[in-house]
Amino acid sequence: MQDSDSISIVAPQIARFDTPLHLKSGTALDNYELVYETYGELNASRSNAVLICHALSGNHHLAGFYADNPKSGGWWNNMIGAGKSIDTQKFFVIGVNNLGGCHGSTGPASINAKTGKCYGPDFPVVTVEDWVQTQVRLADYLGIDQFAAVAGGSLGGMQALQWTLDFPERVRHALIIAAAAKLTAQNIAFNDVARQAIITDQDFHGGDYYSHGVVPRRGLRLARMLGHITYLSDDAMAAKFGRELRNGALAFGYDVEFEIESYLRYQGDKFADQFDANTYLLMTKALDYFDPAYQHNNDLSAAFRAAKANYLVLSFTTDWRFSPERSRAIVRALLDNELNVSYAEITSSHGHDSFLMEDRHYHKLVRAYMDNIVI
Amino acid sequence: MNTEDVADITAPSVAYTHRPDFAVIAAWVKPGAKVLDLGCGDGSLICFLRDARNIRGYGVEIDDTNVLACFNNGVNVIQSDLESGLQSFESGSFDYVVLSQTLQAVKNTENIVKEMLRVSKEGIVSFPNFGYWKNRLQVLSGNMPVSEALPYQWFDTPNIHNCTLGDFEEFCSQHGARILERRVMSGNHQITFMPNLLGMLAFYRFEQQK
């Protein structure tokens, strides 16, 4: 076996696309760049490529570290690597930052060649379908006709699902983890509160905060704090923080008192320092709009009629953002179409975040599934 | 694009457990059928039927270790609790639903048989015959039976709804299930004479009463 640190040092690459991209919204982007990383080797028959789609705040940096920063571990380091569940000794794994992102791919903070200024509010709203379209172009660019698998958690799982609907000939397996076939009213409600926090921040300037030299930090921070609450389970929060007080006694004021307040503010601050507010708005909209059954009279089974892939669907017991019931709805639609599907409901206390956590059983399931993929 | 690749889910030739009762079930299953195995364990029966009858199989299993074993065996498995029904499965979507040596351990027996008949044209069950003479002898001698087919002690048995051939046949007639075929085994031998006394394991194939 290769040393498990064999992909420890990685470097992002950039692909530029100059063919106009027609978006679901009706608008188009004339050109754009996608930043991506790869791990492992593409085999001679080009049959071992795996695309990993990221969730709301994720990016292309899945695994390994950057040479100049030992703290720059990829967001799915526990899952992807040599000898890991998604084994880079078998698969050629690709991570890509989605269009509209803020980690190197063209997004609202990029310079619009037509104006010489940041896109800001002029950056079009993109959807999951649009992302899949850009990822297909990246696959073409890399010479990959068909992915062995497309995988993702949460919003990433939605992209994996959409892949199998839009390009059934180009994906053999889809791993849809902690996802849903559409958002509920409650999901959309949370997203809109997050958006309102950003949009009503006086530093937002209609999305053109770049030219004012400010960022809507307070709004972005609140949005992240709210999001974070929905990623954790009540039990996980209780176990981690309970009613612990920072200074051991009530202060009868409005500063940080409970540990949970301190944690959320820290998470909010950290996020606000590194994420673009317009990207956050765009990602939450992509979530809200995702609903492949809509154009099939809300019949999810009908939406899967063209699908051919084999599916792995995973959910987590304490995930209340995309509960196991949401995954079971996907499974039901796959079964209706007699597609190959396996479904596991993983006992975990970490809520929606479970899909990112180290968990022996979860990782064994993914490994078993990936091991059985013929390349 | 090679569409055969798309249909291919797993590496072939998986090592799975081969139980003698599998052959009885396989004999009843038409080649190429779509089969749902309830309480499928590690997916061995599905693997066997896939090899022997070229079926399209799905398993339902609740236990984590078994679900993982199914993944390793490349068997389509849906993790869920049988007791809460088969909501994931469309009515009439299978040719056979199999409940192999699990009937006696199910809490809501009536509901599961009803669900089997809803999702499938035919149901196949197998269960240890409580009327087997060795079981009767042990009860007569004052103890709960412990045998090859009923290997548990009274205090740790998962078998909460033991029945005899006669009990099951009466149950079927009362619950709208028409028995199509019965096979009774003792080890590898088929029992035709006094099956309710001499049979250790019972197999039934049934359909919805028309």
Image (cartoon, rainbow, N blue to C red):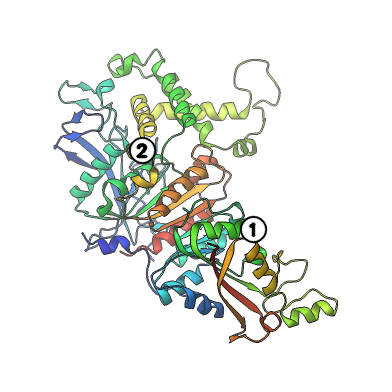
Protein chain holding label 1: B
Q: Is residue B7 above or below residue B25?
A: above
Above or below, A112 against B76 in this view is above
Same chain check for tags 2 and 1: no
Q: Which disc number belongs to residue B110? A: 1
Residue drawn where x is 65% and y is 60% of the image? B109
Q: Which residue is mark 2?
A: A297
Name the one closer to the observer, A342 or A50.
A342
Give, as a three-letter code, the residue at label 2. Asn
- Determine the chain carrying the residue at label 2: A
- Place residue A368 in its image quadrant: bottom left
The spot of residue A277 in percent (x, y) is 37, 25
Q: Residue at x 27, y 16 (%)?
A: A211
Residue A80 visible here: no
Above or below: residue B194 compared with residue B95: below
**Residue at horizontal 19%, vertical 30%?**
A28
Mark 1 residue type: Glu
Q: Is residue A335 visible?
A: yes
Question: Please, what secondary structure does the residue beneath circle 2 have?
Answer: loop
